[in-house]
Image (cartoon, rainbow, N blue to C red):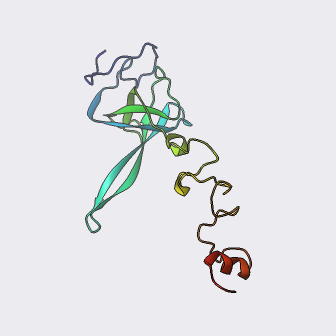
Amino acid sequence: MAIGLNIDEPEATCDDPNCPFHGTLSVRGGTIDGVVVSTDMHRTVVVEREYDVAVPKYNRYMKRRSRTPAHAPDCLDLTVGDTVRLAETRPLSKTKAHVVVGALDTTRELGATSVSGPETPDTDPTMGGMDVEGGSGEAGETGEVDGGSAGGSASERSEASGGEP
């Protein structure tokens, strides 16, 4: 049965009466795209979406999140991290007024795995290619550049600056 959202019908079938594909539930209104963050409840998923809100005082944007509980039909196999599309429907319970109509192909990468790090673990990009241990620097074994007061005795500091003790 076509639901009017240009979504392919899932291959699996189900006997859920609140399925927009195999049951009698009709969809209406808008659609929401988001990421599944919880599948702990029976036939219910929590979908989170992130959006920007303008702050006119600072002429900037801040991030907000909204979490929407939605009905998950049995014919859709959903896991945490899936990007899904929700469609508005009649109220199904106290908090549910949306149903999952399909999983999208995109995935959301979170955390440090999506950020590219240094090419080798021994180099730090903020130090300009210098080893983290400081062994490749020309200023000595501690990696000091100007021989400041960070270490060494007073005579070593005065010799490094070229003055008398």
Q: Which residue is rendered at x = 38% and y = 19% of the image?
A: 23
- Across and down, in percent, residue 119 comes to 56, 41
Q: Which residue is rendered at x = 69% and y = 64% of the image?
A: 142
Q: Is residue 148 above or below residue 1?
A: below
- Across and down, in percent, residue 32 comes to 33, 37
Say which of 77 and 13 sits in front: 77
Total marks shown come to 0
Q: Which residue is rendered at x = 45% and y = 21% of the image?
A: 16
- Across and down, in percent, residue 149 comes to 65, 78
Q: Is residue 94 visible?
A: no
Query: Where is residue 137, by image quadrant?
Result: bottom right
Say which of 150 and 86 sits in front: 150
- Where's the N terminus, which quadrant? top left
Q: Which residue is rendered at x = 45% and y = 37% of the image?
A: 108
In the rendered image, the residue lying farthest to the bottom is 165
Say which of 99 and 11 sits in front: 11
- Where's the C terminus, which quadrant? bottom right
Q: Is residue 20 visible?
A: yes
Q: Is residue 2 left or right of residue 39?
A: left
Q: Is residue 75 above or below residue 136?
A: above
Q: Is residue 145 left or right of residue 141?
A: left
- Across and down, in percent, residue 72 comes to 45, 29
Q: Is residue 84 above or below residue 12?
A: below
Say which of 27 and 36 sits in front: 36
